[in-house]
Image: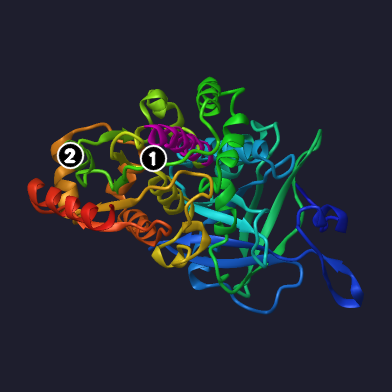
Amino acid sequence: MVFGRRPPAPLLLARFSGLRRGACGRAMAPPRCFALELPGCTLAHFAVGDEAPDARPDPGVAALLGPPGRSYSLSVPEAGGAGCAARVRAARLHQRLLHQLRRGPFRRCQLRRLLCYRPGGGAGGLQHGFLLRDPRDSPDTRSALLALLDACPEAPRPSLAEFSGDPLCRLWQLPWERRDGQGWRQLGRERVVPVPEPALHPVVPDLPSAGVFPHREAARAVLEACTSFIPEARAVLDLVDQCPEQVQKGKFPVIVIEGLDATGKTTVTQSVSDSLKAVLLKSPPSCISQWRKVFDDEPTIIRRAFYSLGNYIVASEIAKESTKSPVIVDRYWHSTATYTIATEVSGGLQHLPPARHPIYQWPRDLLKPDLVLLLTVSPEDRMQRIEGRGMERTKEEAELEANSIFRQKVEVSYQRMENPGCHVVDASPSREKVLQMVLSEIQNNCN
């Protein structure tokens, strides 16, 4: 271990997005800002920088970063620019680190979500990472972390730092750097100070490039970056490329039925389809649904690119079928967007993008339905249905059961969707009653 002076300015400045001026006009790096998820799904924001005001961090932050115990931060930069390939590499590395930090010597540690972002908001520069807290402050944890990073020689290499306190109750971050041929060394220390919570969650500006894709080409570019290591990605792209880029709905109505798992979508969509003599479609469509398991095991950006492109394939089917009969669709774009928002936005409901934010708007190039119905049931009813069903579930469906905050974020995101919005239908009554309510909504909203 080599403890040295603070690195020269060029080395520090390369790690930041912009500059600020200190005393005598000296160029300084702006503080890095962090959002840490605390117990209870609240968020605390703090910064690390050279010129820190004389302030104490949030008590929740101090409890997780300071003694007793030792905390470490790992952040994954997007090496090689901000294109799709860089985002995909960073997302896969982040997921690999998550799996590794849950086993072996790290199992006795606490693991929390940590975001590093640029002050002032805006897209770009966001780094996903972790706070690893070792309550015993074992030197084996530090050694295991350095060995873990040694096993990540390819770009992007995660950045590692640890935190310490001092007798004056101040907190410090101590970054680690690996010099080729010289091993690891600490670069010095920088103050940890509180910063105001930004108006928007730091991840929101990046959502259009991370899963809530605003158009087909954005999702397509992500899967294109995956073809070298996911063979099925090429097959999906070939099917998408067979679909016209612009399609028009026929004269018959198109009704989408959305809802959480176990709200009765399968039963309702089939019953409505039978009643209206409509064509029943599903997203993802059957031509790619056999690859769901492959993409469900990938990070959000890849998983949502798969589902987004599935929506465009379904749109092509809708355009064709709606010239002949009504069309019922079991899930469509709203579910793709809501699950991305609920997954990527850390913290509780208060951290979701506000109502009427552009992220809730329909993609400009995706065929739009005439009506979207959102089936809802109470959490208790949903759990009873799940227990009696015994069906295989995705990771996100399992998360709905285990995490009530995640479920609420999905539900609220559904209800904030616009153009078109969701018409909520209580699916708790009998099947006959629910069918009657759904048919009434269709009659009142579709010609």
Decide if residue 111 is on the left or right side of residue 225: left
The N terminus: image quadrant: top right
- What percent of the width, then of the height, locates residue 403? 32, 52
Q: Is residue 192 left or right of residue 238?
A: right
- Above or below — where is 13 with respect to 86? below
Identify the residue at image location x=61%, y=30%: 224
In this image, 143 relative to 319: left or right? right
Q: Are marks 2 and 1 in contact (CB under 8 Å)?
A: no
Coordinates of residue 362 in the picture (x, y in percent): 47, 52
Q: Looking at the image, is 59 positioned above or below residue 91?
A: below
Viewer-closest of 373 and 53: 373
The percent position of residue 82, horizontal first and vertical second, equals 70, 45
What SS does tag 2 mark? helix
Residue type (three-letter) at the residue carrying disc 1:
Gly
**Can residue 341 be seen at all in this image of the molecule?**
yes
The answer to whether residue 144 of the structure is visible from this angle is no
- The magenta segment is 301-320
Image quadrant of residue 13? bottom right
Secondary structure of the residue carrying tag 1 is loop
The residue pinned by badge 1 equals 250
Q: Which mark is residue 267?
A: 2
Amino acid beneath label 2: Thr
Query: Quick one: label 1, few (<14), some, or many (20+) residues within 10 Å?
Result: some
For residue 247, above or below residue 2: above
Report the front residue among 378 and 265.
265
Q: How is the image coloured?
A: rainbow
- In this view, the mark in front (2 or 1): 1
Q: Position of residue 187 (x, y in %)?
A: 77, 53
Q: Which of the marked residues, 2 or 1, is nearer the chain's N terminus? A: 1
Q: Residue at x 46, y 67 (%)?
A: 354
Report the magenta stretch's main SS: helix
Identity of the residue drawn at 50% across and 22% down: 232
